[in-house]
Image: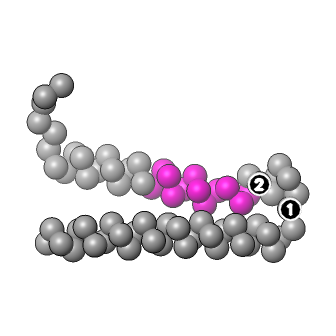
Amino acid sequence: TGEYLPRAAYQEATATLLAMLSQGLRSLPDAIERRHALPPKVLEMIQETIDESLNHVAETLALFTESKS
């Protein structure tokens, strides 16, 4: 719309979106367990993969915030 969006509003919206995404991803193992009755070891591996991916995203975002400081 060509309207100015304050940086703080953009940062807050982005943080909210990322928190929702993280929460949704972290709930996947429980949802998979209920639907497919997978062994605990498989669910643990899924959780580890999700954690690794989210940690990578957090590290990448930290690079952006560090360079702006």
Q: Residue at x 16, y 49 (%)?
A: 7
Q: Is residue 24 magenta?
A: yes
Q: Residue at x 81, y 57 (%)?
A: 33
Q: Magenta: predominant secondary structure element?
A: helix
SS type, badge 1: loop
Sequence-wise first label, 2 or 1? 2
Q: Position of residue 18 (x, y in %)?
A: 42, 54
Q: Position of residue 21 (x, y in %)?
A: 50, 52
Question: What is the image's colouring?
Answer: one colour
Left or right of 38 on screen, residue 57: left
Left or right of 44 on screen, residue 57: left
Magenta-drawn segment: 19-30
Q: Quadrant of residue 43?
A: bottom right
Q: Is residue 50 above or below residue 16?
A: below
The residue lying toward the viewer, choosing from 8 and 1, is 1
SS type, badge 2: helix
Give the number of the disc on residue 32. Answer: 2
Please state which amino acid type lies under the numbered disc 1: Leu
Q: Residue at x 16, y 39 (%)?
A: 5
Give the number of the disc on residue 38. Answer: 1
Disc 2/disc 1 C-alpha distance (Å): 7 Å
Q: Is residue 24 above or below residue 67?
A: above
Pointers 2 and 1 in contact (C-beta within 8 Å): yes
Please state which amino acid type lies under the numbered disc 2: Ile
Q: Residue at x 51, y 58 (%)?
A: 22
- Tell me the quarter of the image containing the N terminus: top left
Give the number of the disc on residue 68. Answer: none
- Tell me the quarter of the image containing the C terminus: bottom left
Task: Sort mark 2 into few (<14), some (14-19) or many (20+) by Cα contacts within 10 Å.
Answer: few
Left or right of 54 on screen, residue 39: right
